[in-house]
Each structure stands twice: as structure tokens, then as C-alpha cells.
Amino acid sequence: MSGHPFKTRFAPSPTGLLHLGNIRTALFNWLLARRHGGVFLLRLEDTDAMRGHEKYAVALQEDLRWLGLNWDEGPGVGGAHGPYAQSERGGIYKEYFEHLERQGLAYPCFCTEHELAIERKVAIAAHRPPRYSGKCRGLTPDAVRARLAKGEPATLRFRIPGARKVGFDDKVRGPQVFDTADIGDFVIRRSDGTPAFFFCNAVDDALMGVTLVVRGEDHLTNTPRQILLLEALGLPLPEYAHIALVVGQDGAPLSKRTGSKSVEELRAAGYLPTALNNYLARLGHTYESNALMDSETLAAGFVVEKLHKAPARFDESLLRHWQAEAVKHATAEELWQWMSSRSRVGELVPPAMALDFVHTVRENVTFPADAHNWAQSLFGPPQQFAPEAKALIRATGSDFFGYARQMLEREPGEFKSYGRALSEVSGAKGKSLYMPLRAALTGETHGPEMDRLWKLLGRERIKQRLDSAFELCQS
Ligand code: GLU
């Protein structure tokens, strides 16, 4: 619609910590807003009096900011369509409830949970869709008044218009048509007065000027209801894109219950935002390029039409691949900050050597815990050898390490010249020269390049480590 900027939104219910599936939805909305030079809005769907929802509302905003998914409108940022928490919009909803009631488009329903449950069971047993029977639809105004006056709890139901089709063109799933005959009158206000999801979610999208709703396909069948509601209220309809869900290796939708990690846990484990963004933007969406991209580049290439219809399968090894890529592309300063805030490398590596340490180990590090292990091997006590390293040192024997110590006195300079000199006196060449040295210096049989390690460790540490290896051979 002209005059309306392209606007997407993320509308989480703060009932728990965000996990990968949630932030993928947030990311897709963010990417589309950026791609189209539009607005990304955040709305908190906190209408239930849920325990702990403030804590989760704070946590989810922290997660989004950490990922760089900043919102242009919403909590803490403001905008022309606030408030942005549904718990603060009661007055707005009230007007729309009244409007619907006045028009006869909504009616109070006195059916109890128990009655409704029985009705659903009967319908299912008779192979009918378990929709509301319409029992309270025809109550006379007098009957309604009398029951309300008695204090009988009532929900408010939206009156589904008689047989007609509701259609929309889903941006991912294509044309969709539903029959109103299959949709029962649904609750838009609970008996405690709080608005139901169908209602406030749709009303807010319209009032907040959202033009494209990108959400999980579990909401697909909610959409015809919401369209009918918006039509009844004379409010504008957004476009919809229902994205395929993320499933685990077992094919079940990813959720906390099935072991999907929260963003908070991933952050604590040291995943980098760029890694998550690159992984998630490709989870059910195709880019031409397999290169690591920054968020703006991811946005430039993000196209709704390229979203897959089939469920996206979560693959931890791919996420780790993007993590390794993100580490590869980060600056040494960023990596030091990252590893030292999430592990104890700062206590092990002398401050003046921090960046040299990063340069030396970065190709062998995917998580802060890896960096910590290297810091421990290189700057911790020298006598800690991994089992393979221990076996190799013993098999090499004390003669070799005796020469290695002597050569250190004579050739303390570059690793190359040291290696040559040691080869001459010990007779060891190639692998049989470098591997025992590596095992002695790092306690490992694999790892960073030797000449870098040599420089980083410095003569004193090298000497201590060769002594330890020598002693190990003699013990
Ligand atoms: N609060 C809803 C949810 O978390 C929002 C659904 C939607 O995006 O419309 O599922």
C-alpha cells in the first residue's frame, strides 16, 4: 500500500528463553526489513499473566541485540504505534471488543471448559472437525444480560460469517483457501478479560502498520481466522509468509523439549553472532554464495521466494562450520576479547603476549574452551602431556631430548635454524624431528605451526618443556 513503509515484526511471547527456531524467525524478519529498506518492529506478546515473563522479555531483547537484530520500533526504542507490550494495550483492545459486540460480530459465551472438552470429544468421535458448536451464538440479549448479572464467567467469541471462502497468497506456500464452514466461532477475549492470541496479534499487526508477517507455518491455519477478524474490524491486512519449521535429526520440530539449545547457552558456549546468523539465514533458504557474510550482505541476498517449503533440518556440524568461519574472519582483538571473556585464558597468557597467542592458536580454535586448552598447554605447567604425546616422547627417548636441550644453548634463534642444527646432531629428520618436539613443547601431537609456537613460548619456556620431556623419558 502506498504511504505504508515495508514493515516486518518479531512478536515473541516471553514464556521462555529464545532458542534457534525463534531467532531464525526474528532473523528472517530483520533481513527482509533491511533488504527492503523497511522497518523491523519488536512486539512483546505478554497478555497471559505468565510467571517470569519480565525476566524473559529482558533476556530476549538481550539475545536480539547480541545477534545485531536491532529493532527500529518497539520496547526501549519507541515509535509511533506504542505501547509495544500487549500487557499495556488493554485500553486499545477494549475499543475493538466493544466495536465487534456493537456490530453483533462477537458474543459472550458461557460454556465452561468442561462442556467444551466434551463437545470436542464428541465431534472427534463422530469424525467432525472439533470446532465450537455455536451453543451461545443464539442467546437473546436478555438471557446474556441475566447471566452476566449473575456473575457467570463469559468469554467473548468472534462470530464467523456464514459459508464463504477466505483466501490469501502466502509468500512461501502459495495460494491458500479456507472454508469458513470449517472454522468455529473462536474466543477473542478470555473469561478473565485478557485478549486471546488470535485477536491481539492480528489487531496489533494492523494498528502497528506491519505489512509482512513472517512466522512459523504452525500459524498457517490461524491466518484465515485473523483475516476474517481484521475484515470485520475494517483494519488493513498484512501479507503473510509462513516459513517451514526447523526440525531436529529425528524429524520433530526443534524445541527446548527436544534439546534445542537456548541462545543464551549458545552464547555462553562461545558461538559468535556471525556464525549463528550465517547458519540460520541458510536454514531453509538458499544463497548463491557459500562465503561468510556480514548481516547487511545476508540481507541484500535474502529473498522470500527462495525460502524452502520443506522443513529445515538442524545440523550441528553445519553450525560448527559457520562458527569456524566466523572465528577465521574475526580480528585478533575481537578474538582475544571473545576468548578471555568466556574462559580463563587471561589468567594464563601474559598480557603482553595476548595478541601473539591469538595469532598462534586461532586456526586451531573454534570455541573459547579450545583457546583455554592451548593457553593451558603453552603457559601452564610444562609437565602436562596428552597420552599420545607422552607415548611419543617416551618412544623417542632421552638422547633426542638431550640433544634438543644442548642445541637450545647453541642455537636459540629461529625455529628453522634450530631444527637444522638439531637434525644434524640427532640424525632425526622431518616428522621424526618435528613431532617429538611438538609433543614436548605443547603436550599435544597436533596444533599450531612450530615456528609460531617457538616465538610465542620463548627460550625459558622451551627449556622447561624440553627438560620435562627429558625427565619423562628417564622416569
Ligand atoms: N506470540 C506468537 C508466538 O510466539 C506470535 C506468532 C506470530 O508471529 O504471529 O508464536
Image (tube, rainbow, N blue to C red):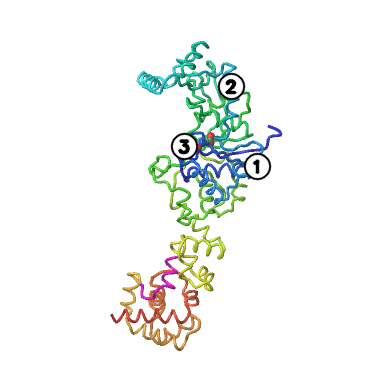
Specify the amino acid type for callout 2.
Answer: Glu
Residue 443 located within the stretch drawn in magenta: no
Magenta span:
372-384
Specify the amino acid type for callout 1.
Answer: His
Is disc 2 placed on a helix, strand or loop? helix
| Residue holding disc 2 | 98
- The circle drawn on residue 50 is 3
Task: Report x, y in % for residue 460.
Answer: 45, 81
Look at the image and tell me whether residue 242 can be seen: no
| Residue holding disc 1 | 36
Mark nearest the camera among 2 and 1 is 2
Q: Earlier in the sequence, mark 3 or mark 1?
A: 1
In this rendering, the answer to whether 451 lies above or below 212 is below
Give the residue at the far left of this rendering. Answer: 475
In this rendering, the answer to whether 458 lies above or below 311 is below
In this rendering, the answer to whether 272 lies above or below 59 is below
Magenta: predominant secondary structure element? helix
Marks 2 and 1, how far apart at CA? 37 Å
Q: Is mark 1 within 8 Å of ligand 1?
A: no
Marks 3 and 1, how far apart at CA? 35 Å
Give the residue at the far front of this rendering. Answer: 150
- Residue in front for this viewpoint, 173 or 56: 56
Task: Report x, y in % for residue 266.
Answer: 46, 52
Q: Quadrant of residue 331?
A: bottom right
* Tag 3 near tag 2, CB within 8 Å: no
Q: Quadrant of residue 77?
A: top right
Name the residue located 38 percent from the left edge and 72 percent from the top edge: 443
Is disc 1 placed on a helix, strand or loop? loop
